[in-house]
Amino acid sequence: MPGAGVSALSHVENSFLLMSWMEPLRFKDTLPSHFGLKAIGHFLAIPCFFAAYFIVAYYPVRSITPMPVFAPDRWAPLLPWTVWVYFSLWVYICLPSTLIESKGLLKQYFRGAFWMAAIGIAIFIVFPTSTPQWTADWAGYPGTLTFMKDAELSRNACPSLHVSFALFTALWLDWLLRRIRATAPWRWGNALWAAAIIVTTLTTKQHVFIDVVFGVLLGGAIFAVNMYWVWRDQRLA
């Protein structure tokens, strides 16, 4: 019976979500947990990532391949003000840790983020890419957008790690919000924030559509592996 199948699937999903060591929690219980470790992890990880990212961008070891333009790239308008939404990723990516109370789970979150960054950087080394040479005169746009274009050199295009991290964070946050029984508006807000960040990779002309596609694939794959690690840790506990 179709209803029985849906019921069984829901039961499995809920069983995984509410593991014995992951009972539903309250936000005020999760935020202070391992606060020092969370702070150190973020304040060390993000600068280290940027250092590796810019070294690879500025000193490519192979010839750089411009990424092709598809219809969505022509449809997406240039919206300079969306650069602030684009930059909000670096706040957004810190949010999942505020809902994690377990050192083991925190380790898995950082582990997933590390491997996603490492795989992305490795791809940039082996297959350097850049966005197309757009016709826009960047000097005529707000300083923040111009600074970003000058700093990043429009390199390290595919996959878009901005997209990968946005999706990875969104999936983790949704999973964690369900654990604390957050209401639907919180989960919708999370999804909309992630979607907005992803869209701004096109509206700031930092990436093209194919970069977004591969960014989604990388972020989704790492999250799936992350969840397997979480499940395995629970089995071994």
Image: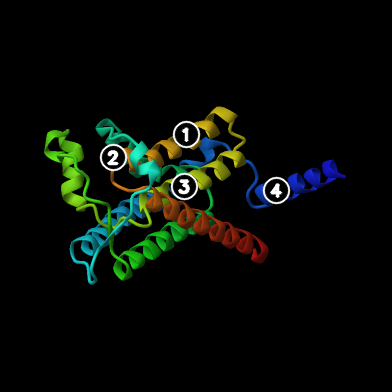
Q: What residue type is labelled 2?
A: Thr
Real-space Cα distance between discs 3 and 2? 18 Å
Q: Mark 3 points at which residue?
A: 167
Q: Position of residue 108 (x, y in %)?
A: 50, 58
Residue 100: tell me if it is visible: no
Asked if the residues shown at circle 4 and circle 2 are in contact, with their CB atoms under 8 angstroms apart, the answer is no
Mark nearer the N terminus (4 vs 1): 4
Residue 66 picture quarter = bottom left
The mark nearer the N terminus, 3 or 4, is: 4
Q: For mark 1, give the secondary structure.
A: helix
Marks 3 and 1, the one that precedes in the sequence: 3
Rendering coords of residue 87 (x, y %): 30, 40
Q: How far apart are marks 4 and 1 (CA)?
A: 23 Å
- Left or right, residue 169 beside residue 179: left
- On residue 192, the disc is 1
Q: Nearer the viewer, mark 1 or mark 2?
A: 2
Q: Which amino acid does label 1 sit on?
A: Leu
Q: Mark 4 to mark 2: distance in Å? A: 38 Å
Residue density around tag 2, few if under 14, some if 14–19, many if 20 or more, within 10 Å = many
Mark 4, other Cα within 10 Å: few <14 / some 14–19 / many ≥20: few
Mark 2 lies on a secondary structure that is loop
Determine the secondary structure under disc 3. Answer: helix
Task: Write down the residue under mark 2.
Answer: 204
The answer to whether residue 53 is visible is: yes
